[in-house]
Image (spheres, rainbow, N blue to C red):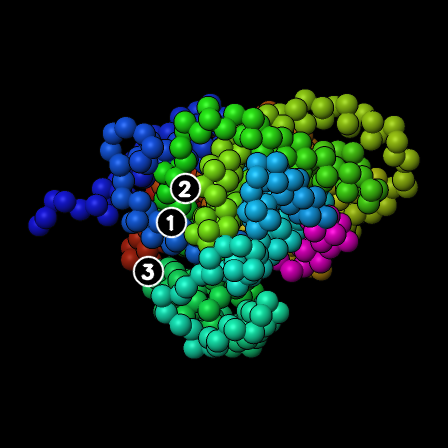
Amino acid sequence: MPHDTPLIATIVAGLGLAFIFGALANRFRIPPLVGYLVAGVLVGPNTPGFVADAGLANELAEIGVILLMFGVGLHFSLKDLLSVRAIAVPGAIVQIGFATALGAGLAWMLGWSMGAGLVFGLALSVASTVVLLRALQERRLIETERGRIAVGWLIVEDLAMVLALVLLPALAGVLGGQPQVDDHASLLSLPASYGIWGVVGLTLAKVVAFVVVMLVVGRRVIPWILHYVAHTGSRELFRLAVLAIALGVAFGAAKLFGVSLALGAFFAGMIMSESELSHRAAEESLPLRDAFSVLFFVSVGMLFDPFSLMSNGWPILATLAIIVIGKSLAAFVIVIAFRYPLATALMISASLAQIGEFSFILAELGVGLKLLPEQGRDLILAGAILSILVNPLMFLALDWMKPWLDARAAKTTPPEEAKPVGPATQPGQVASVATAAKEDDPPPHTALSGHTILIGYGRVGSLVGAALREASLPFLVIEDADKTLARLRDDGVETVSGNAANADVFAAANPQGAKRLILAIPNAFDAGQVVLRARAANPGINVIARAHSDAEVEHLTALGADTVIMGEREIARGIVEEVLGQKPMPRPGAIEPSPA
């Protein structure tokens, strides 16, 4: 077997250094994305030492782009977008236009062409999906109104960039670049000698044809394939089906319709998101998506010349100012103009004050089309790295300002009449009452006491909840899935919407007065945070959790859980009981069922 394997060397060096520098970045509370970019710089041609194969890295990066866009499509929710469309759609469009104008102005000062200014400005106008979603998740903001506005804003930006990726190759010749030559002609390709409007019309016609096929055929075929494979019971086949759909649709979109791989992957994810199995699809594809996404960022880092920081000092500072100050200021003014609270405006401004993966894709496309000079790509890469480094500091500043913002909101918000927030879980009990609040305010507190707090209402939680209702034991459910919450409320079960690891959400469930806490969620890390909060609020509360391994059992027990039940143990106990005709002795970490 030959040992000169550039593909393996590129993957090993890329992933290995990305892990090391990503871990170091995480240790210093910097987004790991910065570490991945640094790893790419170290294996790139602009630094001494090992140099990875740039051609292979770009091929791997293309897969990373496909899987990234597939992930964006999986999280695309038309319902969430429509709920904040009045602010997200005009806000994102105006902010993109403002940032693009600033970028084009800087390009003009640097002596670049109009096409270069357009690509440069567009690249600076769009925030990173990865950075924004991680920042919101860390602060448990996705389920709030502020979070929905930020995510809706991001979706509009992503859609605008997808359109830009489709149109730029068609417009390259008009903008002063080199028209893209496909290695293979699409089945719908036609001679493009019809002028600018002919090219644009043909491109849009191909996109519309692809969209129609996906909406008419894909909406039926893709969910059917997922359900068929799910019924086989093979997790391996299900994971393979998800990846085959993502890559196959992306490649088919390029081959048959001449549209971008990114657009094809996005629609594959969006169509798949309508299936009831979309959450499982996202979970199964996440490891490979993360791995190739890391390789994508490594390949981008390989293109960056660190010495440009010295040769392009003031242009880099100007680029960073456009990203951090210009974009943030535009977003702030827009949100305030729509009469949203100051805290919402500041949070959205901080969320959008960075650039990421779409900016890299646009920069590479611009250089490939001879629209953007390589200096522009270096400025975009430097601006991305520096803005991602600065972004956590902006959120820290918001956290520092939070007491002042809360006090200001309390003074300016008039008190509203208290009203019931949901039916009681126990028959005959009065529904809980709380002061009406906006969606981005802390949830109202329950009036229940001596109750059970059930966290998570999936396959395990729903069975536990049914047993509690049958036994007429008062309980409430903490859940963050909209469909599940709606079903619970229709069934008369009191709920608290949000992530239980959020202090405000958990406090709304009245842990001080609760008798029992049941953690039916499979994530032991989130469960551990809830156990700590529960013990701090009520040392006498009985905590029951679930786990998937002995290590998770030990982790949750060490944090204060009274009983941790591992699924495999309970299955084994049931089998032994069936075989022996008697109940075996309970093992450590198990729990005897209640006589009730």
Disc 2 to disc 1, C-alpha distance: 8 Å
Q: Where does residue 25 sit, x and y in percent of width and height?
A: 44, 27
Q: Quadrant of residue 16?
A: top left
Using the rendered image of the protein, determine whether residue 405 is visible from the camera's viewpoint.
yes
Asked if residue 80 is among those painted magenta in the image, a careful observer would answer: yes
The residue shown at (14%, 45%) is 4
Q: Residue drawn 57% across and 36% down?
A: 110
| Residue that lies at the very extreme toward the left in this rendered image | 1
Amino acid type, label 2: Val
Marks 2 and 1 in Cβ contact (< 8 Å): yes
Q: How many labels does the image show?
A: 3
Neighbour class for label 3 at 10 Å: few (<14), some, many (≥20)? few
Question: Disc 1 versus disc 3: distance between alpha carbons?
Answer: 24 Å
Q: Earlier in the sequence, mark 2 or mark 3?
A: 3
Q: How crowded is mark 2: few (under 14 residues within 10 Å), some or many (20 or more)?
A: many
Q: Which of marks 2 and 1 is nearer the N terminus?
A: 1
User: How far from the left and from the top, in percent, is residue 578?
Assistant: 33, 58
Q: Mark 3 points at which residue?
A: 236
Residue range (magenta) = 74-93
The residue singled out by tag 1 in the image is: 61
Q: Nearer the viewer, residue 188 or 103?
A: 103
